Image (cartoon, helix red, strand yellow):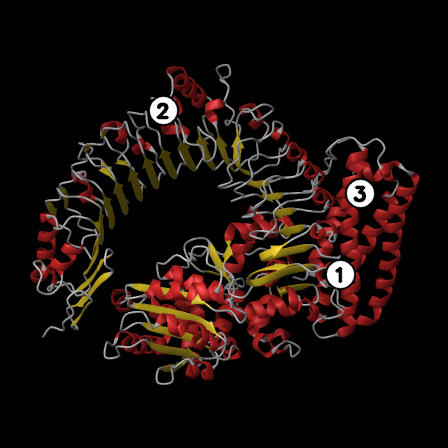
Amino acid sequence: MAMVLDALASTIVSNMADVVKEKVVTVLGVKDELKKLQRRLESIKHVLHDAERKRIQSESVAGWVRELKDVMYDADDIIDLCRYEGGKLLEGQPSTSSDSSTVCCSRPRLFSCFTSIRFRHEIGDMIKKLNERLDEISRNMSGLNLVKSEPDTRITIVDTCQTSPIIDTSDIVGRGIERATDDLVGRIVNKDERKLQVLAITGMGGIGKTTLAKNIFNHTRVKSEFSTKIWVCISQNFSETSLLKEIIRGAGGDPCNLQTKAELEPRLKEAVSGKTFILVLDDVWRADVWAHLLRNPLQSGAAGSRVLVTTRDTNVAMQMGAAEHIHALEKLPPESGWELLCKSLYVTGEEEEMQSLRDVGGEIVDKCDGLPLAIKSIAGVLITKGRNRREWEKVLEKDAWSMGELPEDVRGALYLSYEDLPSNLKQCFLYCSLFPEDYLFDRAELVKYWAAEGFAETQNDYFLEPAEECLEELVRRNLIYKESDYQRYKMHDLLRSLAQFLSQDESFCGEAQKLATVSATAKLRRLTLTDKGGRLALTPQPLLSQRSLKVLFLRGSYSLGSDVFVGFPLLRVLSLANSGIENIPDAVGNLIHLRLLDLNRTRISSLPESIRNLTNLQVLNLARYFSLRSLPKGITSLCNLRIIEVETTYLSFVPSGMGRLERLNYFNGFVVGGEQGCSLEDLSPLGQLRALEIHNIKEAVVAQKGRHVLGNKRHLKELRLACTKPGESPPAEYSEGEIRRIQDVFEELAPPPCLEELRIHGYFGRQFPVWMMPPSLGFLLPHLTSLSLYRCRNVVQLPPLGLFPELRRLTIWYAEAVVSFGSEVYGSGSTQALFPKLESIYLFGMPNLQEWSFCRDEEITVFPNLMFLSVLECPRLKSLPGGLKGSPLKELFIRSCQSLERISHLPALRKLRVEGICPQLKNVEKLDSLERLTLKRWQRDFLPEGLLRLLQDRQLHQDDYFTLALHFSNDALFSKCVMGGEYWPIIQNIPRVQAKSFRRDLYLRYTKEPYQYETNNHPRVGEH
């Protein structure tokens, strides 16, 4: 992406103001030249906002901007160089700067070249030449008619309840989309068409094709008719193998390690065989994706399967076989456009106030030309203006509406929504052009990139918070949208096209072979190389000619040499995630400007000690780094590190000295023990931690009483305490001495009151520490929202969990010694509710749990917010607590509870899932709201009496949408459920039935009304 000019200048001026105060500048004798450079930048800073806007319209302004950016990039690099070499000169003493680039060095170098007169002269000469270049740029500015203005740096915090499930209902306006949905759903579920059928939604970009497709995909009738639902986005330059793998996974298959089209097509055929599926192919550009790739393997699906295509090109839809089933979307009429604008502005209850703005708002909607994307984008501008008529009129009057130099698709509202952004948000928006089309942004990934680039000023020593605010603001402005509940985000392809256009001189995202097509005037600063699934080797040219690169993303199986670490000395962000790289050379130590190094999912087994030179490094991602077992000693020199990620990397050794990393916010791989390894004392200086995982606590040394190594972590939100190393299996037994020691060590690990998530793994003490028990528990962890206890196998008594006032999620796995849940779990006190905010409970692998009793005090409410309960592999548990009838429980999952006799009196329950062996289940009743019953992995040849009675009772409810899903491992039981079988008199009265037997791949699909009966066991068509 292109750095936004005024934002870049502000950052460099701020950094320069800091560096001129540091000792290194005085030692180097360059303070006067740096101050001169600072003054020159400040003198032109006020016209940069106007220059950034006018560069699109004027080539002369664009050339001036390019020259100025070159100077500013060079100035920023010189600041880094001063700090790095000056840090070595000052023998590792930190500067007084509060900037994020605090000076620290790896070791004294008394004979550094920086001490020579020659080197001082060189650095001084570099700064002097920058001043001369800047003087010339300032003189050339006079003929450009640039207007002074102050850049907008605000972040507008709007109080909204923005949520984004798969379908955002705020997008659904007018009767048009309702009629279109009803029409297409009717065609999709129509069983008159027995063969695989293709339907299409067509229309121009931004008109709402994806919104309509999502509305159909999530429709109740579609959910009930199709056992398999798959959604894939298809970019213009899609990878055939990646697409095949995605559809295979969506169909419940596993592509394993297959890498070729020839291998994957049969696997897709196998994955959909016999299944009634609906597949949405969103944003198709070429018909060959159907004719040459998907059509043949998808024919193996069951009769009635459907493919729904969205495309801008009607010819593509026709070539894919949808000629008789094409729905062409039309632009929104003015009334529906106004309705969408109001819904996008969250104005429930403000209808009268909005009505007073109807005239000016209507004119704004008219300028959006009936395109929903444009209306939602302009709503993102208006939401920052309040209900101020004059501010809305200013939006209407902006000349950004008529910026003719832009590509036609992104003119008007889309560009205006960008132009209205503060400069730091513009940079975040443009950064998204570095990712492929239809890319799913991981929230944590994106904000780390922005933070490492310095797009949001760090406050209160929390590295990510400002970047997270930027993401939320872009979501509020409808420039990025949340794709699901799993912290994944997307950018519409038209908005991405806008970002690519605005950053084309400085950034590129595409295949390596297309790099040569980049404009000759472009000096790339940020580059993403992608491939289409094969292993590609980087060629020296034209990549290695781009020596000005600041950011390099390699996305694909590239085979890398050391060139990447030698050829790009100015890199600040380097992502080799999931690439083919197998070792990191010592040359990585030359990348002294590096802020972020991402080696996620690589096969590297070690890091070189030269990593100690990366003293500007802030983010180090070693997650899923399966061969790495230890961190180098040099990592303790990286005093600017904020984040070290080692998730599912099986570290066994972390060097002592980690306490030097005082700015660390996140570390999920602190391993205790080993010769010259870490001790708990290394944690004491790390007062800025937000998230921490401590492993191998069993080897920690017990200190004198009174040590609380976590007590000063006043920002700590997430804590995991694991007694073993990552991936290590615990021994069968522990000695009494080991048990006493682990109990003593855990007493020293009392977390601070601010903690929100606590996970304890492999604790083998017989009792939990005092800080988890009364009276400490009530006040020590008042903000705890999630508690997970894994493999705490010796503990007999659980803490009084009911007293946690904010607890929302409770997970207990393999608590093998726990016999009962009774009063000790609920706790006692003056509270009016126990587990007052608990929403979900997960119990798993508790072989001795026999009794779950309920609180006997009828005046105390228990589980008032419980929505989900999972009880798995508790073979001795006979019943669930009767008091659950007062909870709003909506979903219950039971598996392999061989002694369970009763599931009853759950009036709010909508989904019941029973898996494995539950032969004693005799009473399943009073489930008045039940909508779906799923039986899975059922190995017996009969259904439990209680479930049969429940199915008979459902006939009285007159519920047309009740669904029974059966997944058997026993063919004999399957035969009892088909027409003519023992259970058919019951089955035939159920509105919808889906049954499978995996042993012979049998299936049954039955709908009572309208009548449908399909099976491959005893195929027959019954009379209705």
Q: Which amino acid does label 2 sit on?
A: Phe
Task: Say whether disc 2 or disc 3 marks the residue closer to the N-terminus.
Answer: 3
- Confirm whether residue 860 shows in the render: yes
The residues tagged by marks 3 and 1 sit, at their Cα atoms, a distance apart of 26 Å
Q: What residue type is labelled 3?
A: Cys
Neighbour tally class for label 3: few under 14, some 14-19, many 20 plus, Cα within 10 Å: some
Residue 615 lies left or right of residue 923; in this view the side is: right
Q: Name the residue under label 3.
A: 82
Residue 174 point in image, percent of width and height: 36, 76
Residue 959 point in image, percent of width and height: 15, 63
Q: What residue type is labelled 1?
A: Ser
Instruction: Give residue 903's quadrant in the image.
Output: top left
Q: Name the residue under label 1.
A: 545
The residues tagged by marks 2 and 3 sit, at their Cα atoms, a distance apart of 52 Å
Secondary structure beneath label 1: helix
Quick one: quadrant of the N terminus?
bottom right
Q: Name the residue under label 2.
A: 768
Which residue occupies the foreground of this view, 380 or 318?
Answer: 318
Secondary structure beneath label 3: helix
